[in-house]
Amino acid sequence: MYYQLKELRSNLLNDELFNMLQEIPKTDEYGQTNEYYGKTRKEIVEEINARMRVAYSLTLSRNILPAENYILYVNDKPVCIGGLRFKLNNYWKRHSGNIWYKTRPSERGKGFATKFVELLCERAKELGMKEIFAQCDIKNKGSNKVLINNNFTLYENTLYKGCDDTNFYKKTLS
């Protein structure tokens, strides 16, 4: 299989990527949202461009931190979308972490998310990051497995005490 990680840019929005963004539900079974679902191509291009402005600090926001957003292509087909936040504030350490990812429903269970997270970790290391954080719903067996397969370990998030439905993970990058 041929894996390729591409930074999400509006010029990538072809029919296949548009279809993937519409295949991923607006809200999945664990409450994760897809900001692209149900939008027109023009609206998606505007959203991608807005994210690019934030990624490179051209637009500043209190709750949106600089991040790179990526698509994982397998044999030239888009199968996952996700991102890597360079730094965390308390909001993102509590509510998400450095990485996020979603797999196209028709491509789940094939190991693509595990590969995607591996590549995101490699990118974090290239950027000089020493440690990254992630989280997922405790019932989301697939996502928990992805993180464990990528050598993330559970930790107690003191910013989110009493949270029984979320697993918090961290990974030291060597």
Image (cartoon, rainbow, N blue to C red):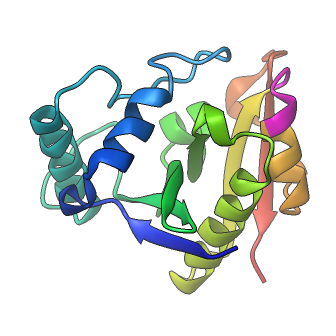
Residue under the point 44% across and 60% down? 70
Give the image quarter of residue 37: top left
Residue under the point 48% across and 46% down? 89
Horizontal side of 127 relative to 54 (left or right) equals right
Give the image quarter of residue 122: bottom right
Observer-nearest of 20 and 35? 20
Above or below: residue 118 compared with residue 37? below
Residue under the point 34% across and 36% down? 63
Residue 115 seen from this side: yes
Give the residues in magenta: 138-142
What secondary structure predominates along the stretch shown in magenta? Answer: loop
User: Magenta segment: does it hold 151?
Assistant: no
Residue 156 seen from this side: no
Rendering coords of residue 140 (x, y %): 80, 26
Above or below: residue 72 compared with residue 45? below
Horizontal side of 98 relative to 70 (left or right) equals right
Above or below: residue 23 compared with residue 71? above
User: Magenta segment: does it hold 141?
Assistant: yes
Observer-nearest of 156 and 147? 147
Rendering coords of residue 93 (x, y %): 59, 42
Observer-nearest of 67 and 75? 75
Rendering coords of residue 159 (x, y %): 67, 31
Rendering coords of residue 23 (x, y %): 47, 29
Looking at the rendered image, the quarter that the C terminus falls into is bottom right
